[in-house]
Amino acid sequence: MRDDNLVERLLGGDRRALARTISKIEGEDPAVPEMIREIYPRTGRAITIGFTGPPGVGKSSIIAKLIRLYREEGKKVGVVSVDPSSPFTRGAILGDRIRLADHFLDKDVFIRSMGSRGHLGGLAGASRLAAMAMEAYGIDVILYETVGVGQGEVEVASAADTVVLCLQPGAGDAVQALKAGVMEVADVFCINKADHPQARGAAAEVRSILEIGHELDPDAPVPPIVLTRGDNGEGVEELKGEIEGHREFLRESGRMEGRRLAAMREFVLAWATNKLEKEIRERLSREDAGLMEKVREREVDPITAAETLYKEV
Amino acid sequence: MRDDNLVERLLGGDRRALARTISKIEGEDPAVPEMIREIYPRTGRAITIGFTGPPGVGKSSIIAKLIRLYREEGKKVGVVSVDPSSPFTRGAILGDRIRLADHFLDKDVFIRSMGSRGHLGGLAGASRLAAMAMEAYGIDVILYETVGVGQGEVEVASAADTVVLCLQPGAGDAVQALKAGVMEVADVFCINKADHPQARGAAAEVRSILEIGHELDPDAPVPPIVLTRGDNGEGVEELKGEIEGHREFLRESGRMEGRRLAAMREFVLAWATNKLEKEIRERLSREDAGLMEKVREREVDPITAAETLYKEV
């Protein structure tokens, strides 16, 4: 496949052009900045939802059901799945993908995993660009799906207008999420496996944590908590309603613009910073023999070494 | 307390001077680089051990027992505890601290928590500098204790010569740690709550994961797995033996130097990068009205905005 007019074909709704564009984003093709220049003005209308939460809570099952609901409305759906970089995890990811398999044959559902962390702007940046490409292609609803509850996952999910945190009962997930700083960014909570005997207890636990948060910041709305069942789809319609409710709140309160701008600002900062970091790494590699040797011999301390690199950039 | 000759007093074994120095590191006092210049040549002899693992596995209890063993040998011990930045977590941290309370009155045990993430060089950088100050003061064994299994925690723990990953039975911790990329950096595994009916099962699970890792990289030694009980100290002596065994391996195989140099290299890179990131943030704040407004209006795409910032630094 030739890459002439790739963006043009993407904008014309060519599915293979979309796949190819995202591959270029993932591969950090030098053409990407120019492509984004053309793509970016066509973005900003899609509904974007971040899904985060620990592995095994059933995010993929819920997403599969949610996709079905959006498809019934005739909306085109895109999923950007973000996988941790560890080479060990491939198997687990594959398992998750299988749960989305219902939608593999649907031309109006586009699912894409993003893997490595080496990207300019980080994995959050790359998934962000992939979502832009999807939107320019004509996708109406974009789901950012992340595996895990680390800081990286939070960054990915935070690119979305609405962040859903999925937890399961009885696994201490809420406490884990709390510690990872995920609770603070979630707009809607989803307790999956609602048939679990501890499901209501888990919801109560989350609610009490949220109330403490609410006391600390009384202006922020208290996020709703929805009980779902990924296996039979129970509660997923309600979840969709709460996501739309949050969207409505953002629009009516005038917070949508500010939220999007803040997210875009993080993208810009991450991209510029990563580019500089790359340059610093390259510089250190060139100077390594000398500079790090001196640090090793304790002739130069590490801060002085860092300041040297900083000044030379 | 005057700060004249602070480093001199630190080097002379003045405990208050050590506390004050670490406060300056935490507060990013402009005097820190100069202080590190004096401190750094006095470092490199201490035993450093990183302790990481999810909250609630009993790391603090094990560390308390391990401190006792080192104290029996007459060694001075320092603990650098790294807390996640979320303001919600204070209570949990307090609980952990209480477990180390036995040692609060011991003049030869120095325990210090590091909190915020805003430091130059990151939290990993700040804890690293705190450890240098401890060593220059005369500490023989430094424990980096982290809460959680995220990338940040991995970075903190990786500053140590030996990394211990603590897990508990029956919580799916191994899988979680695997996904966070922590398994790859651990030199010794500790399954706490050895009296739990699933303890041996958890050890077997970790072992089978490690064997897969070993097949991928046959030159790396397979890390030992120790079953411990934080409550009564069972297995902690064995854990200490395995930590010493790993140290011996590093020394005999000649890998110690390389490992330390790589860790120091990361410090230098992080420091230089964070300093540049700060400069970029400041620049964006100054230009914000103009540049981000254009991004919002879709006149400028975010990559172009980032490249603008990058070039101006």
Image (spheres, coloured by chain):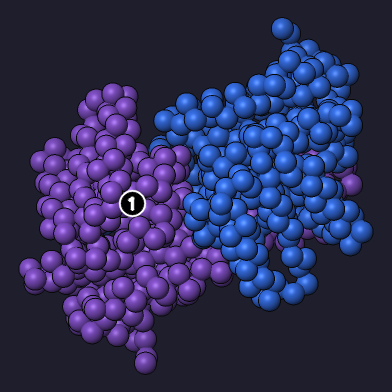
Chain colours: A blue, B purple
Which residue is label 1 attached to? B168
Q: Is residue A163 left or right of residue A307?
A: right
Q: Is residue B136 left or right of residue B303?
A: left
Q: Which quadrant holds residue A97? A: top right
On the image, the x and y values in percent for residue B289 come to 83, 59
Who is closer to the viewer here, A309 or B150? B150
Looking at the rendered structure, the kind of residue marked 1 is Gln
Q: State whether residue A101 is above or below residue B133.
A: above
Who is closer to the viewer here, A66 or A259? A66
Who is closer to the viewer here, B77 or A180? A180
Q: Residue at x 34, y 86 (%)?
A: B4
On the image, the x and y values in percent for residue A55 come to 53, 41
Q: Is residue B196 left or right of residue B153?
A: left
Can you see residue B170? yes
The residue furthest left is B73
On the image, the x and y values in percent for residue A163 come to 71, 50
Can you see residue A135? no
Q: State whether residue A245 is above or below residue A34.
A: below
Q: Residue at x 35, y 39 (%)?
A: B184
The residue furthest top is A1
Q: Which quadrant holds residue A45? A: top right
Q: State whether residue B76 is above or below residue A51.
A: below
Q: Residue at x 22, y 28 (%)?
A: B219
